Image (cartoon, rainbow, N blue to C red):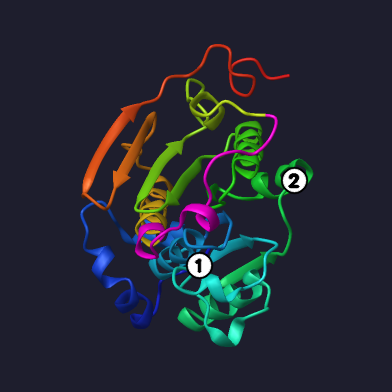
Amino acid sequence: MHDLGSDRDLLRYARQLVLPQWSLAAQENLLECRVLIIGLGGLGCPAAQYLLAAGVLHITLCDGDRVDLSNLPRQILYGDGDLGELKVEAARRALERLDPAARIETVAATVDAELLDTLIPQHDIVLDCTDNFAARHSINRAAWRARRPLVSAAALRWEGQLTVFDFRREDTACYACLYPELDADSGDSCASSGVLGPVPGILGSMQALETLRLLLGQESPLGGRLLLLDLLRWEWRTLGLRRDPHCPVCACPA
């Protein structure tokens, strides 16, 4: 187990160590936790930065895309020099500059059921930072099968949503209870409808916050609730989530 024995380590994490919800033992435990981030776009970039900065050193980055010029206004781990590079590799380099002690693993692939069933059980928690319904449903199924907590967010235009599916609990609703799976992907996308960079930045930071809360052993206030944000009007509201008794994922798995 990593030991916070040096003055440098204690100074690095000093501002969170003084929080009443934190402790030296909790910080040392955090250093050993393993987090999987799927999607290194506008959500995944800030989530990865804040998790590593807080002391989550073991992070696996999963994304098959390469850095494009249109990514740069919101995907803040990348710059002009990264154009054409695999996102996971450009992100790994940026994170290692933030903390050389980082133990970053990369998977340059689009997720499918087989890959997810391999990756997710190796981690303590998974963040869904993807931008399409097909990937979200696949991640939801695999996280439910592995009984791993899933922190899910989405951002579009000036709006976003965030929820936590803690599949360690038997009564937890899942993503398919909220959005029944369709035969084909549908709905708006950032490419067609647009998104303002700080919007996924805010949501990704909130994903990091909820992930840290769970890794500290606390219960998330967003368990069983969906947080909806309208950042154009600064209006926030929450909706209760109930498990669908006919859900094909969590209630009636095949």
Residue under pointer 1:
2
What residue is drawn where x is 58% and y is 80%?
Answer: 93
Q: Within the magenta stretch, is there residue 250? A: no
Residue displayed at 67% across by 78% down: 85
Q: Which mark is residue 115?
A: none
- Residue ID for mark 2: 112
The residue drawn where x is 63% and y is 24% is 249
Residue 32 position (above or below residue 134): below
Disc 1 to disc 2, C-alpha distance:
33 Å
Q: Amino acid at mark 2?
A: Asp
- Amino acid identity at mark 1: His
Image coordinates for residue 210, horizontal then vertical, percent: 38, 48
Q: Secondary structure at mark 1?
A: loop
Residue at image coords 61%, 69%: 104
Q: Nearer the viewer, mark 1 or mark 2?
A: 2
Residue 64 is situated, as x and y percent measured from the top left of the image, at 70, 62
Q: Main secondary structure of the magenta part?
A: loop
* Label 1 crowd bin: few (<14), some (14–19), many (20+), radius 10 Å: few
Q: Which residues are magenta?
A: 183-200
Q: What is the residue that sits farthest to the bottom in this orientation? A: 81
Question: Helix, strand, or loop for circle 2?
Answer: loop
* Residue 2 in the image, given as x and y percentages of width and height: 50, 67
Q: Quadrant of residue 227?
A: top left
Query: Which comes before the other along the chain, label 1 or label 2?
Result: 1
